[in-house]
Structures are given as structure tokens and as C-alpha cells.
Amino acid sequence: MQEVQITVNGLDRSANVEPRELLVHFLRDRLRLTGTHVGCDTSQCGACAVNIDGKAAKSCTVLTVQANRSRVDTIESYAQGMRLDVVQKAFQAHHALQCGFCTPGMIIAVHEILRRTPDPTEENIRHGLHGNLCRCTGYQNIVESVKTAAAELRSKGNRDDAQLDRS
Amino acid sequence: MTRNWTVVELAGEAIPGPYIGRSMPRREDPRLLTGHGKFVDDVILPNQAYAAILRSPHAHALIRGIDSSRAKAATGVLGVFVHADVKESINPITPTWRVADPLITERPVLADGRVRMVGEPVAFVVAETIQNAFDALELIDVAYDPLDAVVDEEEACKPGAPQLFSHIPDNRALLYKVDGGNYGKIADVADHIVRIRVVNNRVLPSPIEPRAVCASYEPFDDKLTVYTTSQMPHMHRRWIAENLNWPEHKLRVVANDVGGGFGCKMHFYPEELLCPFAAMKLGRPVKWTETRSESHSSTTHGRAHVEYVEMAVRKDGLVLGVKLDSFANVGAYLSNMAVGVPTFNCASQVTGPYKIDNFQARAHIVLTNTPPVDAYRGAGRPEATYIIERGMDAVADQLGLDRVEVRKLNFIKKDEFPYRPYDSPILLIEYGDYAGCLDDALRMIDYENWISKQKELRNKGRYIGIGFASYSHFTGAAPSSLMGLAGFDRGGWESAQVRVHSDGKVTLFSGSMATGHGHAITFAQIVADELQIPIEDVDVVQGDTDRVLAGNGSYNSRSVANGGSAAKICASNILAKAKTYAAEALDIPLSQLDYEAGIFRATGEESGETITFARVARFAALAHMKPEGITPGLDETYFYDPTSLLHPCGTHAAVVEVDIETGFVTVLDYVAVDDIGNVINPMIADGQLHGSVVQGIGQALYEHVQHDTAGQLLTGTLLDYALPKADQVCAIKSEFRVNPTSHNPLGAKGVGEAGCVPGPPTIVSAVCDALKPLGISHIDMPMTPPRIWTAIQHAVSNQGGST
């Protein structure tokens, strides 16, 4: 067992974990943050994406001990109470989710795309979503929502949303 | 602009009706977007234990012995169960749909001395933690005597093939026959016989949420609760109760949020029995969650047919008759609907939108040493459409005719409806404007322009193809009497209970089950319109058998058609009763009562007197004064039994580019023209279409479940099984051509499966159109780059040249 200290959604958490424990299980099973999902076991689907120290990462491919002394933000931290952030609002406006299982990982991946490319083309967006599988939507409405979110963030001068500034 | 709707803005105030036909935003979105969904794996019950399953590594083997002593002694292990431990308590699983009296398989929940597929459950381990359970799996020793395995549907029914069951000779559970007219006679006089062999590749439904079950037993009320990823909680309740010899009324099945189903979550699985069994045995809640690689052998597969098609044609392209010999691979055990999908749903439906009077089909239901195959989005109708659309392209190709004209010549004409395909006593198509849909699709894809540019582009070394596919398929299962006739052990009705609370707000309890469908808003739209009250006042409840009385769940695109119609009629019954109370309250005869937008109004002598819907609800709840012969309260239940299957139709078209050096296909454009009847929520209908189209593209280009000849699964993870990604598909333009059905009060035909029915032949048609100058007329799905490249090499060497 190893002791870890991780700041999760702004709160300092510590625990004793087995070295083999995946970060996604630490979040879901120990901290009961079940918004981050497990959809596969080979790192393809992206449903487990979280934000670690300002960057998107697939939490199924991170050992909890690897995240020691890091800041981890999960999907639960993106909205302010029930006030959706720009990306989440765009997803709702464009019907970019159906079953919702891939959605938390998608939201985090979209933030990552926009962090790197504030003015993405359709090709940039689709390429950026390569690591996130959706079986329900066919991706089309997700792509549209990213365009809307990008435009809104640019009009707000980018990064004024505290949720976006992770670095 | 690919989209023809705008979501209705949430202004923070009540949005006035009417609501049907508008893109009202979904209610699930806020919780799903913020990580507050409630999926089965999110359920954490006090004192919960975790289960893992030891699965067979062999496709076919006898079990000589199992030693689980080391596992039982391992850290945290609470129980290790094998067949002997459960056989008195858990009945084997048998199929629900037994069309044409097939030979039946009984599937033990844990292997009974013999395994018939890789992945078959052999032992069930329950432990304190999931790591304890996985660790214990490694400590179970199973001695196998491998047997020869057979995985191919044609090989398995040949003499000498390994037999899976001694009572099922040639591994053939059923030979299904359809006969209309006289094919043999017409073939004798035809100008030409077209013959093709097509494969409908085995695929995985692959919802992103893996299956999961969490069961607990509560001594307080002697009640079993099973959370499971289900598209039909009430059916699961019946099946679990039956197989555990447990009374239905003491079993609660709950499906809250379900992360996609596409058919695979409407079937019945061993884990759904093992978890409640273990929960009762151990006195602890037991949760099992599938890993993705586990799902590749433990959750049902889809499609998996080989079809031999013969078409007797006249020289102008008129199809005089069709003969089909179909081999359907159903895996090692007959799953729920496995027998019906290739037979009633496919073979009987092959003529589709075409007028073909002479039709003969023989469908072989073949068992092999592979995981069970069962209904997957479209369930038989994608296979049927693929057969006839590849056939029509072949007719055009072999007779040197135009693909569009051949179809128009053969379509059922508008004045021939209602139409009985090949004089079938059961099938009756209400209406379909097939030519209209085809024309629209070709216009939207800019067909003429592409055809004229195609040659010029080829001269520049670019191989562009335009493909299309027309379809008519059935939805809305089904009149309950037809379910009975077809050997389907369930009802075809759908239930709705509308309860008006004493404050005037309304709850709809619906037997339909959303797994991403958005019923919480579409059904609210239906009820709010019927009651003429604000949509904010209507709540929709599904998924919990303790809260919803009864239901048949969601499949066959039946939710809006049946569940929605049930809700509408139920709400109208509520309104009829409310009117009697309003008249009583206003002290006027019923004939002098008007109702509009939530207000009852006296029109006669007391003209101008009003009472609101909410006040009437309170009035009925108090029942201080009751209309003659009327009971207190406003609470109605309605079971809607459809009177007919429904027939959505349409045409999809696509433009692709094939890189002949690499075999790589890019989908440049895709259009969908679909007649799904009245559209309740355009945004949601569009979303269903997009998702199903991409599944169709996935089957055509990327997805394939592969086994080696020993039955080992080669596509065991998402590393090998290629689900389409965002950068592998394009945007889809869609149009809904509305011809309402007269068969239900909503006029709706169902949209859920519309995309994956014509999707695959659309893409195949486009690729073959691109490669036509190389002499290629067909490539089997999935048309991966190696397959296309190989086909090009063969074609080119046959032509004796190089590209």
C-alpha cells in the first residue's frame, strides 16, 4: 500500500492505495465521483477522461500513485452548481448527447481541443475527438457544439471562464 | 447547413404549447452533462460485494473437473459457484421468440460439463473487492478436454461438422420457409437470372456503457432488487422471476440511466440470474460489471448472415421473382430473439419496397461455437434491405441498366397500397412514396452533378462513387395477436399511467424505456399537448418496475409509436374525466363546457365562469362533490395494443472517394431522406438518425467480429474492433418526408433504426460505383482498405493490366 495525496475538484484527498489501483477506480469507488466512466479496458473510448494539472488525461491509464501530488478535476467540477459551463450549454443546445455515458469524457476532451486550438476547423475538431468514442450521436452534433462553444469563448476573450484555466 | 431544427431556448419561464413538432430541449442533459447520471455501475449499496466470472478459453470442450478450493480460501472471497451449486436454483435460459417451432437450446447460466463458446461462464466468484474477485479467478483450476469447434454458418450444417447439441442435427435449429407465388415457374420464363452471394458481417452493438448488474435482497419485505442495464425492465423482471422460481411481485428491476442498448440490452443474460442468486445466498448485495473485452464474448453480437440470392428478371429490369437461401449464424445458444431476426424479420421482409410476386426463401438457423447473435438495431431489416439493394444494383449492372430506373420500375406504385408483399396473409404495407424519397435523396446529394463530374475526376486519377439504397422496413412491434402468431412470448402493447396530483401537476409512468432516446421530453410533449397544460408540469417516469406497472420496453422503433400512443390516449381519458369534475364544479351540464389551454369555461347560461385544470385536480382529489357514477381522483391507466405494424421508408445516398493505392475510403457526403410519419421532436429524431447512420457506416467500412477456425475471438478488444471515430465519418444531411400513419393516434412510425437499415448498402453501392471502371461489382463488408486493395488487385490482374 502507498499513501497518496491528490487535490480532487479543489479538495485535498489522501488515501492508502494499492499501486495497481487505477485513478478512475480511485475517483469512482473511493471518492464516489461516479461522473467519470469506464467504457473499455484498452484506453480507446475516452469515457474516463479527467483533467490532471491542466491537461486532459484518460484516468483508466493512470495509476493513482502516478497522480500523487497532482490536481485532478473531474466532470463534477465543470458546472457551477447546476449552471452549465459554455461547453456543456453548447452540448445541450445541439443535442450532442443521447445516453450520456461518453459525455463526461467528451466534455473534457472538448475543453482540451479548445485549450490547444481556440479556433478549430471541423477537421481539427474531428481529429481532436479521435480518442473519444460515441455510439449514440454519430458525432455530428458534438462537432457542431464545439464550433458554438469555440465561438462563444473567443467572443468572451477566452479563458475568462475559471473552469478552463487549469495551468 | 446540415441541420433543419433549432432547439427551443430555455428562457427560464414556462414555454407555452403546443409542443409536438418542436425541438424541446432534453431533461436528462443537465444531470448527464455534469456527471450526475445514475448508471448501474454507479450504484453503490451498503455492504456491497463484487463479482467476477471465470470464462472458458475454449470454443468447444468438455469440463473434466473444476477445483475451486484455492479460490474459496483466497483473501476476501465470499463464494465461488459452479454449475452444481446453482442448478437446483436457477433454470437454464431459453429463447423468447420461437417462430415456426424451432428446436430449442437450454443455456445453463454456468457451464454444465461442457462449454460451447469462448467466454462461456464457468464459475462465478463473489468477493469483498473487485480486485479480490479477479485475483481469485486465477486460483480456479478447470480441466478441459477440447473438442473440435465450428464457427462458420455454412460449415456447421454440413455432414461431419462438430455437433453442439445431440438433439439438434446439423446444428440447424430451424429451416424457415417463405413461399409466395411460384419462383420456379417464373424463373423458367425469365430473360435473365442474377445470382449474388452477400455476407452481412457479424458486428458488436457496442454501447459505450458495458453491461452491469447489481442485486440485493431485503429481508424486511422479502424483496429482491436487481439493477440491470435493461431496455425492458418488466421483461427482465418476468424472466428473472421465472428462472429463479421467484414471485414477480417480490422482484423489483431498476434501470435508471442506461448507456445505450441498440438491442443487446434487451436480451437475457446469465449474470442477471447469478447476481440475485448470490445476493440471496450470501446476504450481501452483489455487483457485476462487464469489462469491455469481456463484452466482446459475453454480450450478444449482431447480423452474421450469408445469403445466396437469385433474381429472375425481365430484360428491362423488371424483377419477376426472388429466391433466397440464407444461413444465419446464431452462436452457441439461442438467445432471446435469435430465431426470429433472420426469419420473420429478415427473410420474410426481403421484397421491401418492391413489387415482387414470386418469392421463395429458405433461412437456416445455424448454431456454431461462437457467442450468441441476437437482435441489433434494425434486427433483420438491415439484412433484408442489404439483400434486395445489392440485388437491384446487380440487376442494373448485369443488364446494363440504370440503377435508379431499375428501382423505379420495381417499386410498389402509389396506387397499389395497402399492399400485401407476395400475397402474404400477415404483411400489409400501408403506404410508401418510394420514388419520391429516391428523387429527393438524389437531388440532395446532387446526383446528376456528381455523375457528370465522375468521369472527368477518374481521368485525373480520382475514384469517386455515388451510391444509394431505398428501403421499406417495419417497426412498432406489434399487435399482441401477431406476437402470438409469430411465436413471440411477450405482448405487443405498451402501457401508460397518467396520474394528476392534487396540485395539478402530472406524472406519466411509461412502460417504454429510454437508453438515450430522450423520452423524458418527447413523452412530456405528447401528454402536455393532450392535456393542454404547461410542459413543465408533466413529469415522465420509466425504468423502475415498482413505479411503472407494466411495460414491454423499447425496441423495433416502437417507443413513440406505442408508448407515445398509450400516453396520448391515457391523457385523453384523464381529460374526459377531468371535464366531468369541471362541469360538476361549475354546476353546468357537460355539453356547456369548453376547455382550452388549461382553462375550463362555461359556455351556456353561466358563460364566462372558469376553473383551471389544477383546481379541478384538487376538486377531484377531495371528491366532496362527485359527478354521477364517477370515482374520486384523476389517475388513469391505458394499455395501447397496436392494430398494425408500421412501415417507415426512405432512401439514403452517399458520395465516397476510394484511394485505389491504399484501399482507403473517405465518405465525402451522406444524405438521408426518411418517412417516419409525424415527428414529435425534430432534434431528437435527427439525433437518432445520425447515430444509426454512423452504425451503418461502421458496419460497411470498419466493424467486423472475427474468430479463427478454432473459435478464438480475434477481435477481443477495441484495439481490434474498429468502432467508427469522429474523424472517420462525415456530417449527414437529413430530411423527413412526412406521411403520417393512420395506424396510431400520433401518426408516427418510429425512427430509431432508420439509419442502419439502408446505411450499409448505400456505402457499398457507392464504393462499387467508384470501382466500376475496374470491373468491380461487389465487395463484402466491412470494406476495409486491405479488402478493397485486394479486390482492386484481383480485378486489375483479371483485366490483364495495371492501374
Image: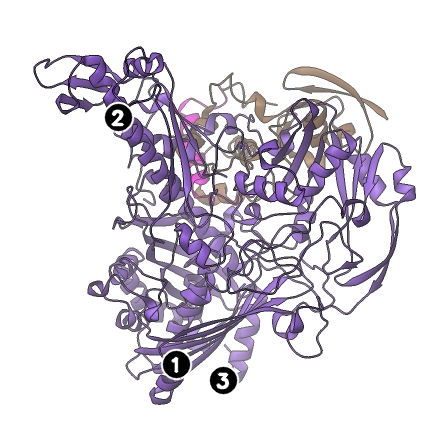
Chain colours: A brown, B purple
Neighbour tally class for label 1: few under 14, some 14-19, many 20 plus, Cα within 10 Å: many
Residue B443, image quadrant: bottom left
Magenta highlight range: A131-160
Q: Amino acid at mark 3?
A: Gln
Q: Residue at x 48, y 33 (%)?
A: B549
Neighbour tally class for label 3: few under 14, some 14-19, many 20 plus, Cα within 10 Å: few
Visible in this render: residue B637? yes
The relative height of residue B550 versus residue B157 in the rendered view (above or below) is above
The kind of secondary structure element at disc 2 is loop
Query: Numbered disc 2: what chain?
Result: B
The kind of secondary structure element at disc 1 is helix
Residue A8, image quadrant: top right
Marks 3 & 1, CB-CB < 8 Å contact:
no
Q: Is residue B150 toward the left or the right of residue A157 in the image?
A: right
Q: Amino acid at mark 1?
A: Tyr
Which of the marked residues, 2 or 3, is nearer the chain's N terminus? Answer: 2
Query: Numbered disc 3: what chain?
Result: B
Marks 1 & 2, CB-CB < 8 Å contact:
no
The relative height of residue B315 versus residue B499 in the rendered view (above or below) is below
Q: Is residue B346 toward the left or the right of residue B470 in the image?
A: right
Q: How far apart, in angstroms, are the residues tagged by discs 1 and 2?
A: 55 Å
Residue B532 tag number: 2
Q: Which residue is under mark 1?
A: B183
User: Given this view, does label 2 or label 3 mark the residue nearer the observer?
Assistant: 2
The kind of secondary structure element at disc 3 is loop
Q: Which residue is under mark 3?
A: B799
Q: How far apart, in angstroms, are the residues tagged by discs 2 and 3?
A: 69 Å
Instruction: Residue B715: give x, y in percent of width and height.
Output: 67, 57
A132 drawn magenta: yes
Which of the marked residues, 3 or 1, is nearer the chain's N terminus? Answer: 1
Q: How far apart, in angstroms, are the residues tagged by discs 3 and 1?
A: 35 Å
